Amino acid sequence: MDTATEPETEPETEQEPRGEGPPRGRFSLRGDRGMTAVEFVVLTPLLFLVLMLTVQFALYLFAKQAATAAVQSGARTAREEAASKGCESATGTWSQDAVTAATDRARDLGGQLVLKPVVTTAYTVDPLLDADCRISLVTVALHSQVPSVFPGFGMTIDVHAGGPLEQPVRHP
């Protein structure tokens, strides 16, 4: 018996078009249509918000650093001049010199970031201090606003600096 061997053929199956078929993973490919647009619409405003918050935070930190340096400069001026320019008298110019030094330094360093700085000085009198001037401590404070990236969102800075008066003290 002579049997001819027939070549084995694979049964024909219908090939599904690409992209269609059973779902893979959690979502089917048909359900993913337009997902990129939805992600873009949702995530883009969040990305811009994070970016703008970063810029606002950087503006605040830079303005605070400039204000701190300005107040330290004003306090240094007050400590140096209080004993020599009138001490406790109301006519002494050390307080005005300290305010001027702090305001000028804030404008030099901060520019437009330190808006309308309000600089004040204060001092503490120690009646037990054995020196020509009874002031023991001078303080300079600065209050200012920071420009806002967001309308209606105002931030303020309050910094203080001070130290003991630089003067000779008599020891017993």
Image (tube, rainbow, N blue to C red):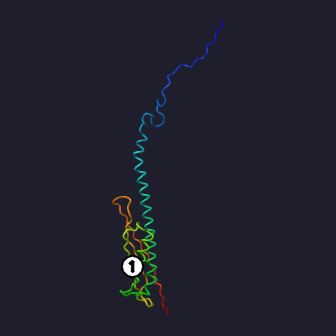
Image quarter for residue 101? Answer: bottom left
- Looking at this view, name the residue that lies furthest to the bottom: 172
Q: Which residue is mark 1?
A: 121
Q: Residue furthest top?
A: 1
Q: Nearer the viewer, residue 124 or 52?
A: 52
Q: Which sits in the foreground, 135 or 2?
A: 135
Where residue 131 appears, x then y in whole percent?
A: 45, 90
Q: Report the residue at 48% width, 34% height from top.
A: 24
User: For mark 1, does the 10 Å Cα neighbourhood hold few (<14), some (14 to 19), or many (20 or more) residues?
Assistant: many
16 over 114 or under it: above or below: above
Residue 121's spot in the image, x, y percent?
39, 79
**Residue 28's quadrant in the figure?**
top left
Residue 153 x %, y %: 35, 61
The residue lying at 45 percent from left, 36 percent from top is 27
Q: Residue furthest left?
A: 152
Q: Is residue 8 left or right of residue 70?
A: right
Give the structural element (helix, strand or loop) at label 1: strand
Amino acid found under the numbered disc labelled 1: Thr
Report the label total. Answer: 1
Q: Is residue 58 or residue 122 the one in the foreground?
A: 58
Name the quadrant containing residue 62: bottom left
- Quarter occupied by the N terminus: top right
Q: Is residue 82 above or below residue 160?
A: below
Q: Name the residue: 46% across, 76% down.
A: 73
Residue 114: x and y in percent read 40, 68
